[in-house]
Image (cartoon, rainbow, N blue to C red):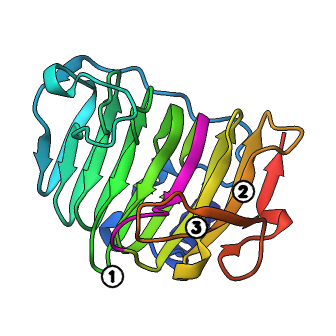
Amino acid sequence: MTSHKRKTGRRRALVGGLSALGITGAAIVTTSLLAPAGAATLPAWPQAKGSTPVATTIEVAGTYDGKLKRFAGTGELGSDGQSESQQPLFVLQDGATLKNVVIGTPAADGVHCLGSCTLQNVWWENVGEDAATFKGTSKTAVYAVHGGGAKGASDKVFQFNGAGKLVVNRFQVADFGKLVRSCGNCKKQYPRTILINDVDITAPGKSIVGVNANYRDTASLRNVRIHGDTKKKIKPCTRFTGNDTGKEPKEIGTGPDGTACRYAAGDLSYD
């Protein structure tokens, strides 16, 4: 009889590791989305199962399962430019989950989370202004990104404007500016916590995460695999002096410092 003890042990280890990163309860997704850290091949991008044009922002309370259909903007949402005034394709209320969605082109301003939210198996084929913006005001808010991926972000993938904790787990990104940016010049600023675990980064790209050291932001990187960046041009963690006046924030340093940027050389691998 074949023993299943090793598989069970692995699953418990994965769940335990995610819990240590602050991912608990309903935010822990099935192990089908959680390949072991250090996996040799990237998960394949899904084939969209039909298309849905979005002319008006879709509001989500509870769980919205897109069944892997492609959602793309049309009409007033038919832009994939960099205007800060664009509306999103999806707005998630506090506690909502968006899953199994392919966001096509044009992507408008992607997804907005107004409080704690979960983005599970969401794929951006070509990021517009931002893939997702996290806007909750509670320090206990948790924004969880599990699985999925994004391509073609000329600037940011995830814009962290609100308070609380952002966890990005088992995600892949390629051809991007920044994977995560803590807002550098929002009118209301908060100390923000960012956890990036078990992700694949494919060049070209500029920075994995940007934080505001003066607002006590922290960013932890674990099991980050960087592909196609042999000269190590992608900055793993960049520190800024943020402000609440709207001015362009000043970059003050890069690399691990044990305070704002929390990782070691062994947390990153290159191929």
Which quarter of the figure is the N terminus placed in? Answer: bottom right
Crowding at dot 1, Cα within 10 Å, few <14 / some 14-19 / many 20+, comes out as: few
Tell me the SS state at disc 3: strand
Say whether residue 120 is visible.
yes
- Residue at the (11%, 47%) spot, across then down: 59
Q: CA separation, marks 3 and 2?
A: 11 Å
Compared to residue 169, the image places residue 25 above or below, namely: below
Distance between mark 1 and mark 3 Cα atoms: 19 Å
Under mark 1, the amino acid is Thr
Position of residue 67 measured from the top left corner of the image (x, y, whole percent) = 25, 33
Q: Kindly indicate the quadrant of the structure image that contains residue 250.
A: bottom right
Disc sitting over residue 140 in the figure: 1
Residue 171 place in picture, x, y as percent: 54, 47
- Closest to the observer, 170 or 243: 243
Residue flagged by tag 2: what amino acid is it?
Pro
Q: Gap between marks 2 and 1, in whole Å?
A: 26 Å
Residue at disc 1, secondary structure: loop
**Residue 184 percent location from the top left of the image:** 49, 63
Q: Which residues are magenta?
A: 175-188
Amino acid identity at mark 3: Val
* Residue 211: assigned label: 3
Disc 2 target residue: 236
Query: Which residue does the image show at 68% across and 82% down from the upper left?
Result: 259
Which mark is first along the chain, 1 or 2?
Answer: 1
- Out of 122 and 241, give the one closest to the viewer: 241
